[in-house]
Image: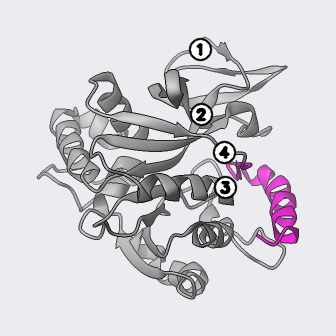
Amino acid sequence: MKEPILVVMAAGMGSRYGGLKQMDELGPNGETILDFSIRDAFDAGFRRVIFIVKEEFKAEFERKIGFPASELMTVEYVIQSLNQLPVDVNLPLERQKPLGTAHAVWCAKESIDAPFAVINADDYYGVHAYQQMYAFLSNLKQHQHYAMVGYALGQTLSPNGVVSRGLCTLGMNHELLEIKELTQIEAFESSARYREENSSNWQEVALDRIVSMNLWGFPVEFLDLLERELIRMLQTMTKEALLKEECYLPSVVERQISTVAATVTVLETDARWFGVTYKEDKAFVKEQLAQVNRKGR
């Protein structure tokens, strides 16, 4: 079996943050979060990385992140574009937002030829998380078996506003039973709370609830499934939906779980997750990266 690949989703617009946070210098020596992530993934065994980026900042990304990464791994680039679709659909000209994480990974379909891990460019996952994922992918034997690294919700919240998280329900033997994608979840008193889209009602949720931070592991066959899901979504969308809706990777996984078409193992990790959702989060992340740097990571 071919060696596992690291796939990095770096084409996000950072709408809440107000800029391209994946290229922000937050480390003590001017490093980005992704610089640390590449090093951690390399230490865990990954030797090939595919960066999914937007065309307009590919050159800057390559100079700032891709070139240093190429000293450790084989580096490839894939462009996520609204013009790249698996079916002939005319998206509204005024749409600017990407089509979501499922579309991002599908855009790399022609480059991925081995089991692969998927991460967000602007999240720090910790070396242990990559070790767990690399071990899973290296021993993957079933086409319908996926993996996700789970984190306690309380360790992933921002004190500066609402965040998006995939709220997970686990069964026996760390099997993922359900994942619910929430775009409005926040710290509240001694717990957390969330509300559904287009709802004013908040619901409480425990801080130790496991959430997805988009660190996934898939067999290469998952890409064919992504294509079918994207086609289904695009062909059934209303004109209004085509203007703003996105297809989330966790939603595709949830559909597979609910139809018993696949199983997902939630990998345990003692790693600390952190990331920047708002500009006000930068001070905390800088402090955390300084600690990682002092430990030699």
Q: Nearer the viewer, mark 4 or mark 2?
A: 4
Residue assigned mark 3: 128
Q: Could you give the CA–CA distance between mark 2 and mark 3, rounded to whole angstroms?
A: 17 Å
> What mark, if any, has residue 269 been given in the picture?
4
Residue assigned mark 1: 200
- Vertical comparison of 1 with 152: above or below: below
Circle 3 packing at 10 Å, graded few (<14), some (14-19), many (20+), is some
Residue 60 image offset from top left, x and y in percent: 54, 82
Side of 241 relative to 139 (left or right): left
Identify the amino acid type marked 1: Ser
Identify the amino acid type marked 3: His
- Vertical comparison of 62 with 13: above or below: below
Residue drawn where x is 55% and y is 28% of the image: 167
Residue 71 image offset from top left, x and y in percent: 57, 88
Residue assigned mark 2: 211
Front residue of 20 and 133: 133
Residue drawn where x is 88% and y is 70% of the image: 294
Q: Nearer the viewer, mark 2 or mark 3?
A: 3
